[in-house]
Image (tube, rainbow, N blue to C red):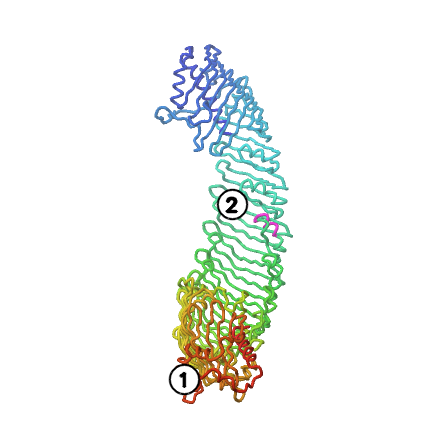
Amino acid sequence: MRRILKIVGGILAGVVVLLVGAVVYILNVDLNAWKPEIQEAVQESTGRLLVINGPIEFELGSDTFLKASDITLTNAEWGSRPQMVEVGSVDIELKLFSLLGDTPDITRVHVDNVRAIVETNAQGMSNTDFGTATEEEEPKISGGDADLVLPIIRDLRIADVEVVMKDGVQNTEQTFRLTELTLGSEAADAPLALNLDAAFDDLALIMTGQMGSLQSMTDAGQPTPVDFVGNLAGIDVSIIGQIQDLAGQQGIDVTISALGQELADAAKIAGIQVPSLGGFKVDATLKGSGDALSVDPLVVDIGKPDVIHTTVNGKIADALGQEGIDLAVAVKSTEVGRLSPITRAFAGQDVPDLGPLDVKLNVLGGLEDGLQVSGLNARLGKDDLILVNAAGDIQDVMRQKGIALNIDVTSPQIGNLTPVVQQVAGPDQSIPPLGPMSLKVAVNGGMDSGLAAEGLDLTLGGADTLLLSVTGGVGDLLKQDAIDLNIAAKSPELGNLSDIAKSYSGQGIPDIGPMNMIAKVSGGMESGLGLNDLAVDFGRSETIKVQANGGIANLMAQSGVDLTVKAVSPEVGNLSPLVEAFSDAAVPALGPLDMSLRVAGDANGTMSLSELALALGKAETLLVEANGTVADLVKMSGADLGFKVVSPDLSVLSDVAGTDVPAIGPVDISGQLKGDAGEPMSLEPFAAKIGDSDISGTVTFDGTGDVPSIVARLNSDRFDLKDVSPPSEGGQSSAGGGSASGGAAQPDDGKVIPADPLPFELLSLVNADIQYKAGTLIAVSQLTDLDVAISLQNGSLTVSPFKAGVGAGSISGTIALDGSQAEAPLAIVLNGDKMGLDALLAGSGMAEKVEGPLDMTIDLKGAGNNPRAIAASLDGKFQMSVYDSRVLKKAFQDAFGDLIANMLASEGGWILLDCAVFDYDLTKGLAETKAGYTASGPVTVTTRGEINLGTEQLDLAVKPRGAGLATLPLQVSGSFTNPSVIPDPTTVGIGILTGVLTGGIAPALLAVVGDLPEDHPCRKEVAESQEQLEKQPEESGAATNPVENPAKAIEEGIGGAVKNLFGN
């Protein structure tokens, strides 16, 4: 406001001086004729246009007067108004001859109806910055004396003034209105009277009073009394006292008092918006001279206790130099939270409801030598929440050095601060109720030299939950450097923290046992904050005991980690109550746990795992051991881990799996896992013994490509799938097959071969190169000297070679399947030579029920995406021959019934198979019989016809003969699921036999019997068949039939056999 009055006064004074000067200069000249020259002179000095629209009235005499009206001064080009100043009228009258004396006598100065604007633009440029039309000249300073010359103003009146102030930077606008200002005196020895009636926006500015006469103002021997009272913006102001020498500014003794009902109203004058703070009172006595002015005493009382109340008492020896300050300051508040409206207005932050505030301090010194705070004693808070006490001194407040403060903070329950935290950080934040808190620390130093925290002593929590202790110091609080802290934490039972944990995470902490921890934190944020001498242990010896020791060189960078961890439990099953606190799973009673390891390195660099030693369980149940290192845990590279798993019976894992685990065992598995991230992982060596089976070798897994790959080289002396897939409750191994009716569920469309799509896409998920050799492999068959290689590349599966011994014989061949194609092509080539039937059927439980050799040739090709489509597309051949073989009669009866079993030759409880030959050519799934012949003693069965694998239809002619059986051909037709066997009278007689033999049976038999002894039944059977071609068909049927109704018996027996064959 002072600047505003100065600007307004300057403008008015400029106008007055300009007009008075004009009077003296032109005397009785007609000033109206000089308007252009006057306007030009103003424009040259200001760069603005002055226009005097009204007439200039001038009369020269002893009482000389000058009057002008309707005067305007243009605004800056960017201004919001065209005119910066508009003056309605100016009226001046003076005693002409007084100008010749020492004291000019001005009779009248009246200025009315003034409108002005003072503004800045968005760039901060003011319209009071006047430009000039000519180059600026340096101001000329005249020498000589500068005695104060004050005129006699008998009647000064300025009325109806409005000045608008606009701030283009802050986008604010304020208005000063002067209703009337009068100032004057009747004579040189008469007092000068003042009357002010104005307003700043809505705040009234009223001042009345008087000061000494003009005579006393100019006479150093006479004191000039001062007596003004008023109300400025609601503030009662008084200025009372005297000045001995006003002109020389000596002998000042004036008391200034200000009394306001609301400090916020006073702040509004300065453009500061604050909420209600209460009233204030200021009393300041100014003494001395203009060069050395003191304030003594100074008494300040501001605010109210329920918000904030501040008092200041003391003196300032040098007010102008701001030296010799000696003030006692006290600040009180019944609740600091009530300061929130103030802090919110200035800082956008609320003050939490911490309780009362009481601060006392002394301010001494000055700005040059340093402002000192001594005797500081501050107290904040309340006993049931938090209480903060601070005491000490600050040697230099302005330079923030020489700080020596002792701070003491206590709280009966740190959790009670939750409402305070929620005020500041939001309703979702809280502080756990850990217990009482006590902090003591001394803060010493300064901003330049470093602010240190010394003698730090912090305790937090209670002995029944968690007790935390921190002692030590911080050498530089500002830089967070030279930290040296000792930390200790203790809990009698971590489970006692369960309720606290649940309130934050929803998950409690089980009763793990006691916890003890000590550590040292040292260093700094820039140099690195280290955690040293860490020693942690928690748990109980009867459940689990965990220990960790070591340190971290740089906590912030997570580098220099060197920790050793050890965990010991006498029985991991005792951990079940702990685990059940987090899940429904239970820990089986596997035995003791003993684990130790070391972790070292950097989290953002290389973190290694070393000295791993793990032993879990016990040999009589399950024992797991592991040891080794991982060079880089972050990148998971450089792994070199050995492991061993031993168990007499894996069924002990049933509790862990949540289901029954088969009784597999004993188990002894060991290996060494090696590899790097981004490189293949290898299991080398690897060895496993399961039951009486063994397997060993190497396995390499490579997950770096688009498709992971497996390379395995495995060997077994003996491997029985029953050892890894034991018999189910029904007695059959899940890997060994079973009865014909015990296989997979048949399709629900009335067919045997399923049409469900095969998951060939799985073949593209991994590439594989597997080689396996076994001395003995027992699965469906018992194979010896097995040598198989499996290759899987991009969905294409190849098994080659595949060769093995089967009993006294062997089998070899290849299998190729390309699952990457929509219609996957399949090729199977298998050749079996003198394969022992007992070995071939060993996995199905027939090893002790069948004997004899089997020759087999399979060469088939097909394509499709399901078994039915593949079967319907098969091309190639299938040949099988059995000779000198026998089947346990009981097993044969179970499969084909008593009638058929009784018709065949038997000896000592065995059914004899002298010769059986089956030869089929396949075209698009249609199997055509080239040879179908079975001989058992005197009984022979010949077969011809077709089997359609695509439609699953049968079209076969079967003719049994011998042993007194009438030659009765049978027709086998229908489907796999519903075959039909009926007599075929249309083919009775020699015709069918001739057709069968000439259809290819003789060449097939000759190939089979070529290597047999001369007296082999198959040789004899062929010879007899050839003889029958020369005889009449009527010769058959003369023998006695030992079977009652043989035709019916054959029909039922063969029908039942066909149904069993296809799983019906």
**Where is residue 291 drawn, in percent x and y?**
47, 33
Q: Is residue 421 magenta?
A: yes
Q: Amino acid at mark 2?
A: Gln
Q: Nearer the viewer, residue 52 or 1061?
A: 1061
The answer to whether residue 125 is left or right of residue 309 is left
Magenta residues, start to end: 417-425
The count of marks equals 2
Q: Which residue is mark 2?
A: 372
**Which label number is shown at residue 1009?**
1
Q: Nearer the viewer, residue 801 or 296?
A: 801
Q: Quadrant of residue 195?
A: top right
Give the structural element (helix, strand or loop) at label 1. helix
Which of disc 1 and disc 2 is earlier in sequence? 2
Q: Quadrant of residue 708?
A: bottom left
The answer to whether residue 457 is left or right of residue 84 is right
Residue 195's place in the image compared with 452, above or below, is above
- In front: mark 2 or mark 1? 1
**Where is residue 313 drawn, in percent x and y?**
58, 40
**In the current view of this chain or complex, which residue is farthest to the right?**
384
Q: Nearer the viewer, residue 862 or 593?
A: 862
